[in-house]
Image: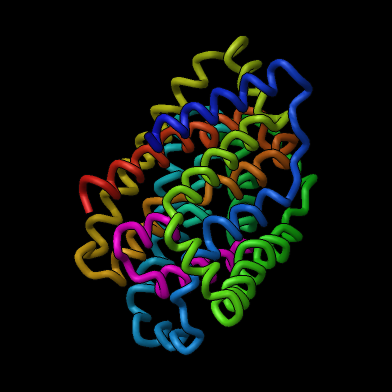
Amino acid sequence: MQIFLVFLAAFLGLSYGYNTDGLQFSSDICLFAGLTMIMPTLFNFKIKEIVLVIEHKVILLKSFLINFLALPLLALVIGLATGDFGIAAGIFLLSVLSGGGMVMHWIKKTQANTSIGFILLFINIVFISLSLLMLHIFGLYTENYFQAYYSDEIMLSSFARGVIILLIVIPFIASRVLVWFAQPLVNYINKYRPYISNVSIFLIILYLFSLQNAQLLLEIYDFEPELILISFVAVLTFYILNFLIAKFSFNSKIPEEKSAFWFSITRYITLALIISTFSIGSFGASMLIPIMLAYVIQIPFAIYYSKHVT
C-alpha cells in the first residue's frame, strides 16, 4: 500500500505541474516534514541521553566516515561513468546528504535505537555546510572532465541554519512541549503514527513533484530520453553498493548499529531536491533526474526492507 502511495503521489504531482504552472517552493514543507515525520519519534528521547555520543563514539565515527568519505567516493566514480555533469552532480549530492525526515520513521518501525537516530540526524544536519562545500569542490574539479561550465552563482550555506531550525530545533521543542503538557495528544499521535506517516509521505512527495522545476524532467524526456535510463542505472547502482557497504559495516541485530545502518542506506532526498532546484544554473537540469528517481528507488526499498528483512 505504501509503495502504491509513493508512485501515486509522484504521478499526481507531475500531472498537476504539467497541466498548470506548477507550484513555487516553500520552506514550509521542511517544517511539515519535521513536525509529522521527526517530532513523533522524539517523544521517547530524553535530554540526558546526549551522553550516548561518548558511549557509542565508534558507531558515530564509522557512520560519519561512510557518509562523508566512502559514499562520496562511490558517487564520484559512478558519476564520472555517466558522462553527464548534471547526473553526476545529482548522485554526488545524494551521497553527501544522509538521513532525512523519513529515516526516523524507519528507525522507529524496525525497533532501532531512536536516541542514536536523533543524534545522527542532528550531526548530519549540522554538517550540511560540509556537504555543500563538497558539492562545490565537486563542481570545480570535474567541470573540465565533463567539458562543462560550473558557475558558482549560488550561496547555499544559508540553507544550513534554516534546515537546523525547521528539522531539529522546532520538532524537538514541540516534542518536549507535548510530552510535558499534552500527554493525551502524545498518546493519540503514537496510536495513529503509521497513518500519520503514510499521509505525510504522500503529501510531501505530491508537493515536491508538483514544483515547477520538476517539469524539467518531462522536457529532458522529450529531447534527451537516454539520460533517464543512464540516471536510473547509475542511481540503482549507487543504492545497491551503498546497501552492501552499510550491511558490511553495521550489525543490524544491534539497535544502535541498526540506526547507523539506516542513516547510511537512506539519503536526504527532500533536501537534495531543494538544493538541486537552486543548483540547476550551476550543474544543469539533468541534476534533478537522479534525485527524482531516488524517490522511486529508496522509499519502496525502505518499505520492503523494514517489513521483510529486518
Q: Can residue 67 be seen in this view?
A: yes
At horizontal 62% and vertical 17% (from top left) the residue drawn is 218
Judged by its main secondary structure, the magenta piece is helix
68 or 34, nearer to the observer: 34
- Residue 123 percent across, percent down from the top left: 52, 71
Which residue is most to the front?
184
- Residue 82 percent across, percent down from the top left: 47, 29
Is 160 rendered above or below residue 13? Answer: below
Which residue is most to the top?
222
185 or 297, nearer to the observer: 185
**Left/right of residue 279 with respect to residue 172 in the rendered view:** right
- Figure quadrant of the C terminus: bottom left
Range of residues picked out in magenta: 103-129
**Left/right of residue 98 with respect to residue 23 in the rendered view:** left
**Left/right of residue 278 with respect to residue 245 in the rendered view:** right
Is 8 rendered above or below residue 202? Answer: above
Is 7 rendered above or below residue 137? Answer: above
At horizontal 26% and vertical 49% (from top left) the residue drawn is 244
- Residue 96 percent across, percent down from the top left: 51, 54
At horizontal 43% and vertical 27% (from top left) the residue drawn is 232
Is 120 rendered above or below residue 263? Answer: below
**Left/right of residue 59 with respect to residue 161 in the rendered view:** left
Corner quadrant of residue 127: bottom right
